Image: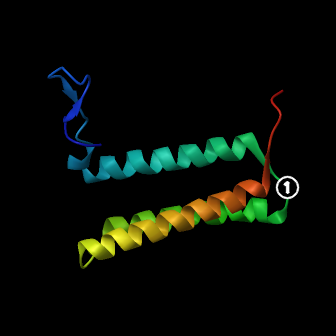
């Protein structure tokens, strides 16, 4: 996503980066694809043990999409402090929700 500024080795001058953030539609598409692909893989490798396991995963996905769109299209935070607090609070919320959903789902045995 970032500019070609990621070094390949600590001692080399070669740097990589796809600069996808320069293209808003492409960045949006790639990030949604990665999020959706991860949810698809997780849903395919697990099975709900309870009703919450089904709707909780859907809620997790919907919340992720809503937060992404609001962050993408909404105004910038009023201060760096607000950005840090908001990011930490949302990260904590997502971790707790993911833990809760994961406990309501179990691994599917491969065939």
- Residue 70 seen in the current view: no
Report the coloring of the rendering. Answer: rainbow
Residue placed furthest toward the front: 11
Residue placed furthest toward the bottom: 78
Q: Quadrant of the C terminus?
A: top right
Q: Nearer the viewer, residue 84 or 3?
A: 84
Left or right for 44, reference 65: right
Residue drawn 23% across and 25% down?
A: 10
Which type of secondary structure does the marked residue at label 1 adopt? loop
Q: Nearer the viewer, residue 71 or 82?
A: 82
Residue drawn 60% across and 49% down?
A: 39
Q: How many marks?
A: 1
Q: Mark 1: give few (<14), some (14-19) or many (20+) Cα within 10 Å.
A: some
Residue 107: x and y in percent read 79, 42
The part of the image, by quadrant, that contains residue 20 is top left
Instruction: Using the image, determine if residue 107 lies above or below residue 96.
Output: above
The part of the image, by quadrant, that contains residue 1 is top left
- Residue of label 1: 49
Instruction: Using the image, determine if residue 110 lies above or below residue 71.
Output: above
Left or right for 78, reference 109: left
- Residue 11 seen in the current view: yes
Residue 11: x and y in percent read 19, 21
Instruction: Using the image, determine if residue 60 lies above or below residue 31.
Output: below
Residue 54: x and y in percent read 76, 60
Residue drawn 29% across and 74% down?
A: 81
Residue drawn 19% across and 36% down?
A: 5
Left or right for 54, reference 82: right
Residue 70: x and y in percent read 39, 71
Instruction: Using the image, determine if residue 43 lies above or below residue 13.
Output: below
């Amino acid at each position: 996503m970032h500019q070609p500024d990621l070094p390949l080795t600590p001692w080399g001058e070669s740097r990589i980066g796809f600069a996808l953030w320069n293209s808003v539609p492409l960045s949006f598409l790639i990030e949604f694809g990665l999020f959706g692909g991860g949810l698809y893989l997780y849903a395919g490798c697990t099975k709900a043990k309870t009703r919450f396991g089904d709707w909780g995963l859907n809620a997790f996905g919907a919340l992720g999409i809503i937060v992404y769109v609001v962050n993408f299209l909404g105004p910038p935070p009023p201060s760096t402090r607000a950005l840090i607090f908001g990011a930490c609070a949302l990260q904590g919320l997502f971790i707790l929700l993911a833990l809760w959903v994961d406990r309501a789902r179990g691994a599917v045995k491969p065939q």
